[in-house]
Amino acid sequence: MKRRTFLFAALFLLILPATWSQQLGKRITNKDVIDMVGLGLSDDIIITKIRSAAAGGTLQFDTSVDSLKELKAAKVSDEVIKVMINPAPPPPRS
């Protein structure tokens, strides 16, 4: 019984870091947004990507003043920056 418990614990410890690294690899950062802008993707596509990633909790944006300067220098639009700051979609209009 102890051997089985040890094997399960060892397996868990081997799988857990792999899962964490995959999740970290999927996070969207400022650099990803700058890269998408550089590819010429429209604001609508970038915003959709940000909002879909927000649902999975995979955003990792730095919206400090220095980072905002970098985003503007990279020609990221104000609309995209606003969604980076607050990725929740606006409430539906009645």
Image (tube, rainbow, N blue to C red):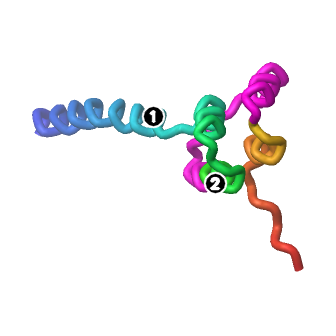
The mark total stands at 2
| Residue nearest the observer in this picture, 19 or 48 | 48
| Residue nearest the observer in this picture, 91 or 78 | 78
For the question of whether residue 81 can be seen, the reply is yes
Q: Is residue 60 left or right of residue 65?
A: left
The residue at which mark 2 appears reads as 45
**Looking at the image, is mark 1 or mark 2 earlier in the sequence?**
1
Q: Residues within 10 Å of mark 2 (few under 14, many from 20)?
A: few
Q: Which residue occupies 81% across, 62% down?
A: 90
Q: Is residue 20 left or right of residue 58?
A: left
Q: Give percent across and percent down for residue 41.
A: 62, 47
Residue 1 vertical position relative to residue 31 in the rendered view, above or below: below
Q: Which mark is residue 25?
A: 1
Q: Residues within 10 Å of mark 1 (few under 14, many from 20)?
A: few
Which corner quadrant of the image does residue 38 belong to? top right
Q: Which part of the image, by quadrant, shows the C terminus? A: bottom right
Mark 1 vs mark 2: in front = 2
Q: Give percent across and percent down for residue 45.
A: 63, 54
Q: Give percent across and percent down for residue 15.
A: 28, 36
Q: Is residue 59 left or right of residue 6?
A: right
Q: Which mark is residue 44?
A: none
Which stretch did the figure color magenta? Answer: 50-75
Q: Which part of the image, by quadrant, shows the N terminus? A: top left
Q: Secondary structure at mark 1?
A: helix
**Please, what is the three-letter code of the amino acid marked with disc 2?**
Ile
- Asked if residue 74 lies in the magenta stretch, the reply is yes
